[in-house]
Amino acid sequence: MTSVDRLGSMALGASGQPRSMESLAHGHEVHVWYVMTDRLTDERLLSTYDGLMDPAERERNSRFVFASGRHEHLVTRALIRTTLSRYHPTVDPRAWQFTTNAFGRPELAGPLCEPRLRFNLSHTDGMIVCLVAVDREVGIDVENVTHRQVDGVEIADHYFSTTEVADLRVLPRSEQRDRFFDYWTLKEAYIKARGLGLQLPLDQFSFHLGDDGPIRISFGPGIADDPASWQFDLQRLSPSHRLALAVRRYDEPDLAVRIWPVVPLRDGGCD
């Protein structure tokens, strides 16, 4: 496991802002911000979030059939816009522009700021997460494991590597569900970090989850990548929520992972 500092309240510097950019810019850390969406009911705050969206985001928000989808999308856009402005406080949260790569991964299009930030988002029932780093590939996935009724072994038989399936099958049935979600979230995080979608077949890379030592990855012949260049982590952010992240390292020690709960515009500024 990596070094994790999960803070019930944000660690603040002298300015009242999290000691964020300095640690990111020096390459020592990656940061995770998460929102418990069910707790966001303040209509004035939600109205302020609506004011942060650009016309395309607002139009997309209007297309959600259910109020829960509109709420989740609204908070997601507020989270990423205000989070980016924590690191570049001279940029108004409304000014950030986004694009997607050929496989649909969201990326920053502007303003152009140094150091260059990379981010990844994930959402599930009750939670949205945002992973931020400086100029490195990152991916994150969060799942609500209590709301998902799945037969993990059956899904693994169809999609996971033979190594992972074998590992699942030797576990007691009572432990298989947890291990399935470990694999599932890790695979999602790695795919999102690479930004290639399902061009990376799930059965062509394997995670190795021992009791001791870091989480490892290995690749089949169809994937050209260096397993030693990756760092992975698994966390429980609540009794219901399992999180995995993937971070590309560059011949360096493991980065520290710092995790904050946040309410956009209420915790730590960016107003």
Image (cartoon, helix red, strand yellow):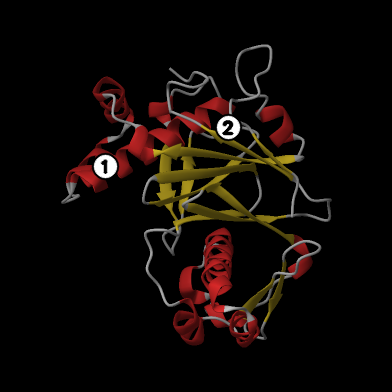
Towards the viewer: 71 or 89 = 71
Instruction: State the residue position of label 1.
Output: 56
Residue drawn where x is 47% and y is 20% of the image: 270
How far is the residue under mark 2 from the one under mark 1?
Answer: 23 Å
Query: Of the numbered discs in the image, which one, if any, rests on residue 238?
Result: none
- Circle 1: element type: helix
Towards the viewer: 147 or 175 = 175
Q: Give the x, y percent position of residue 153.
A: 50, 81
**Left or right, residue 190 beside residue 13:** left
Q: Quadrant of residue 39?
A: top left
- Circle 2: element type: loop
Total numbered labels: 2
Towards the viewer: 162 or 253 = 162
Please state, as top left, top right, bottom left or bottom right, where the N terminus lies in the image: bottom right
Residue drawn where x is 59% and y is 80% of the image: 168
Q: Give the x, y percent position of residue 222.
A: 62, 84
Instruction: State the residue position of label 2.
Output: 113
Residue drawn where x is 42% and y is 22% of the image: 265
Q: For the residue carrying disc 2, how many other residues have a C-alpha within 10 Å: few (<14), some (14-19), or many (20+)?
A: few
The three-letter code of the residue at mark 2 reads Cys
Query: Closer to the N terminus: mark 2 or mark 1?
Result: 1
